[in-house]
Amino acid sequence: MLRFFEIVPGALSWLTLVLMVVAARFFPTAAAIFIILFDTYWLFKTLFLSFHLRSSFKKVRRNLKIDWLKQLSDHSDKFVDWDRIYHLVILPMLGEPYEVVRETFESLSRINYPKDKFIIVLAPEERGGESTKEVARRIEAEFGREFPHFLVVYHPADLPNEIPGKGSNQAYAAEKVKSEVIDKLKIPYENILVSVFDVDTQILPDYFGRLTYSYLTAEHPERSSYQPVPLFNNNIYEAPIFARVVALSATFWHLMQQSRPERLTTFSSHSMPFKALVEIGFWQKNVVSEDSRIFWQCYLHYDSDWRVVPLFYPVSMDANVAPTFWRTMRNIYRQQRRWGWGVENLPYTFYGFSRNRRILLSKKIYWIFNTIEAFHSWATNAILIFALGWLPLFLGGEAFNYTLLSFSLPEITRTILTFASIGIVSSAILGIVLLPPKPDWFRAHHYFLYLIQWALMPFTLIIFGAIPALESQTRLMLGGRFRLGFWFTPKMRRSKSETEGGVGRKV
């Protein structure tokens, strides 16, 4: 049964694309009508998601103006024991340069929350070699005294029954810190929130105040994960044009998802109660997409009594930047393919649903439909709209080409897509608003260049969206040696001169 569920997502995506080609050749009228209806659906969906994007953005801006520690302190009648909450922060690491890791720890050193309530764990991969160890030593020497509890936990290489990657790394680190710090200090598990951050994740000073506030005011605090908004803008001025569009598009997607908590699952950097993490047995060590898998582990373990609380508060992460343009393009594709490999959670979840009779059938149907629809849309929508939408004109034959519908199809689809571009325009404007403080070389004309870059969005949706997602689903469908392992996204920083004269200014 598990193998059947692995085949379903890829089979549905390929069946959709193949049927579109067949219909364009043999049933061009039906295919043309389908294209018009599908484009109309995409128009309304784009407008619907644009409303969510603006709503989430307003909430984020409002939350950024609040001193969350003051909120906790000034309402001591409501938050009597807020300072009992400890924060365990785990930062897996493999080969990232010192400059990237240092920026993360500089942001941690500026947090507006009692530092004696933190347990900071830098978790380098042993297989990273001497360069990784040297970075860890420098970080510990520079920031180790900032926090009473600071550990460096090396994840051994080649442990049995593991996929080398973030999930196995942070599980090993959490088990170590549990036995060596938490249990020795006898800190109650229910008083600990664990946050897992990519090592390039930079935290705003009030982040942990916001997290603590959300935890203490949540309807089900011990049965919830807590999700910030990932802003991929640490190095946005160093990124080439395609990398910027992909990075900002990812940010916008996660902003929109914050306003749809009923469909929200954990992604990348997130937080959860340590007690629940211990009860489910930590992160699974043999999966690639551990960030979303942990949600499904909890959902199945607690018989659907698990949800994600959106924080409407950002953390800042790196956009893809490599030494050359083409290496950056390759890295973007590989990162998107790894994100698309989150499809591996579908068979795990559906198989778990088939064995758990305590979860309501309505909830199973809801998640099965929405998760399949999400991955199917990811792999097919952009191809259907921008690549296959014109097929009836080329494959439909003379009989179809002399019909009124064949003459009207381009005009109708062009009109619908023009209206749909309203969402792209709003994204372009919001992309300017979300830019971090401008570097010295940034001039007025760069605003215009950063706006018109969104004309590339149809291209990026196919090359860096649909195709890597389709590849991931195909690999899962084929199984065996085609399955993906974990791929760490390389991180780097450019010098000021490189940024001014090269990638950072090119569009």
Image (cartoon, grey):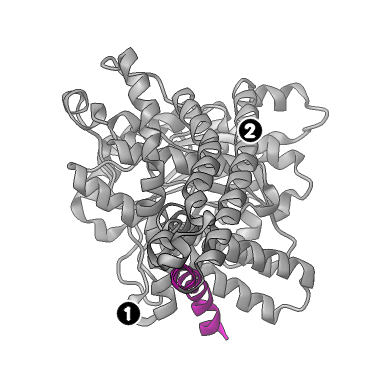
Amino acid type at circle 2 is: Arg
Q: Are marks 2 and 1 in contact (CB under 8 Å)?
A: no
Q: Is residue 44 above or below residue 156?
A: above
**Bounds of the magenta segment:** 1-25
Residue depicted at x 75% and y 43%: 218
Q: Is residue 207 above or below residue 414?
A: above
Residue depicted at x 23% and y 30%: 506
Which mark identifies residue 38? none
Q: Is residue 257 magenta?
A: no
Q: Secondary structure at mark 2?
A: helix
Q: Is residue 9 magenta?
A: yes
Is 137 left or right of 111, judged from the image as shown? left
Q: Residue 127 location in percent, x, y?
A: 26, 61
Q: Residue 400 location in percent, x, y?
A: 47, 64
Q: Residue 224 location in percent, x, y?
A: 69, 52
**Residue designated by label 1:** 481
**Residue designated by label 2:** 210
Placement of the N terminus among the 4 image quadrants: bottom right
| Prevailing SS of the magenta stretch | helix
| Residue 166 appears in the picture as rendered | no
Q: Residue 425 location in percent, x, y?
A: 49, 30
